[in-house]
Amino acid sequence: MKKNKVDVLVIGAGPSGTIAASIINKAGFKVMIVEKLKFPRFVIGESLLPRCMEALNEAGFLEAIKAAGFQEKFGAKFVKNGKVCDYFFADQFTYGWNWTWQVPRGEFDKILADTVEKMGVIINYETTVTGIEFNGSNSVTFVEDIEGNKSQIEAKFIVDGSGYGRVIPNLFNLNRQSHLIPRKTIFSHIKDSKRSLDDEPNRITIIVYDQRTWIWVIPFSNGNTSVGFVSEPDFFGKFGGSTEEQLRALIATESYLSERMKDVKMIFEPKILESWSASSSIFYGDGFVLTGNVTEFLDPVFSSGVTLATVSSQLASHLVIRKLNGEHIDWNKEYTEPMMQGVDTFRSYVVAWYEGTLDTIFFANNQDPSIKSMICSVLAGYVWDVSNPYVKEHKTILQKLARTITLRDSLIE
């Protein structure tokens, strides 16, 4: 059986894995990535947030991404019954990046993977992890490639950025049920020939369809647009036929999209995802750390997934480097607590979205610009800036604001 020996094994070649691999590799350690699939491959998470840019920059990926000509993104637009609420990242409260990209993830992820390979990191595609044995922080990982060849990888540490594959949580029974309501999405990419260049494509549009249903509209620079409906599973039972017939029927019922997307060409047969929210009981162990969706995936509504993936891998990689250099790491204080700060803030906004609290705030008249800038920072992914009251007090402040708006409007009436 073939044996390999590295300092760090990274599981998964998505943004989380490649960012960690790049940063650790640049520190002088030998890194290998194993990836179950062949790239390019399709995955959702196509609208990035500005906070991602810090991690992508440190990993050395920005030049390659810019060369691809992806659609630049400067904000988020929310639409309800013809009323529009725009958030532009340039107005955010937190100092930081005020733009990012909207990307077809298959192409984007392959650029990151190709770039990290050019840095000297080996990626073994179509290779599945079948088992891991730990001896303290050292480990032996058993893998099998698509042709059935088995091998072992000895490592001093493992970074699990396997995303929905959840390799270590599945192997060691670390999965934890999410408390968010299970939801479902049906989506595709469409040839968007009727797109208004005056209004788009420089931001994501999120449309409130009804109290529990929303739509994403993510324009790309190639003329295609990602469109997806998100709701509780029973909502979709009202629309029969094939997945394409269901999506076309859904689009026809939404006035904001119906004419623009009537009879459009769908780039691929619409896909369905459901019950995606997941969590892990621990984020680290003796010899491994979980990053990205392996830690926790909430909901696609605020594009938190890639942000948590990039930031967690950026943070984890520095801790791994320090550990390999002989330092003692308080993983709970230096990793779990910071990551839960971000996860919990995003979770509060996700819950407030589905409860209708953010609906009241986003579509209120005479919005306070200072408050709007603070909320804008959260929508830009700066969920670790506790100098922002709308981060620090995320558990209660949105409900207080919504009640104030409701009371104010009732007095005006």
Image (cartoon, rainbow, N blue to C red):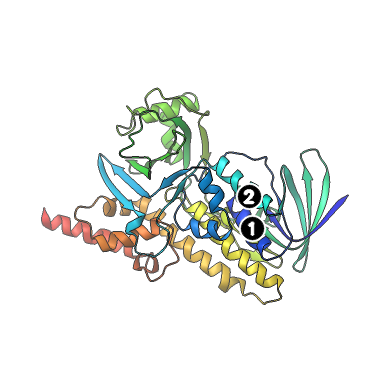
Q: Nearer the viewer, residue 314 or 248?
A: 314
User: Sequence order check: which comes first, mark 1 or mark 2?
Assistant: 1
Q: Helix or strand or loop: what does disc 2 sit on? A: helix
- Tell me whether the residue at label 1 lies in contact with that at label 2, contact meaning CB atoms closer than 8 angstroms: yes
**Total tally of numbered discs in the picture:** 2
> Does 171 appear above or below 94?
above
Location of residue 29 (image quadrant): bottom right
> Does 410 appear above or below 81?
below
Q: Helix or strand or loop: what does disc 1 sit on? A: helix
x, y percent for residue 301: 42, 48
Residue at 50% in and 46% down: 45
Side of 361 where 227 appears, left or right = right
Q: Nearer the viewer, residue 101 or 133?
A: 101
Q: Nearer the viewer, residue 277 or 375?
A: 375
Residue type marked 2: Thr
> Does 46 appear above or below 282?
above
Residue 378 visible: yes
Location of residue 252 (image quadrant): top left
Side of 380 where 364 appears, left or right = left
Side of 232 where 410 appears, left or right = left
| C-alpha span from label 1 to label 2 | 9 Å
x, y percent for residue 378: 39, 59
Residue type marked 1: Ser
Residue at 74% in and 45% down: 127
Residue at the disc numbered 1? 22
Residue at 83% in and 49% down: 151
Residue at the disc numbered 2? 115
x, y percent for residue 138: 77, 65
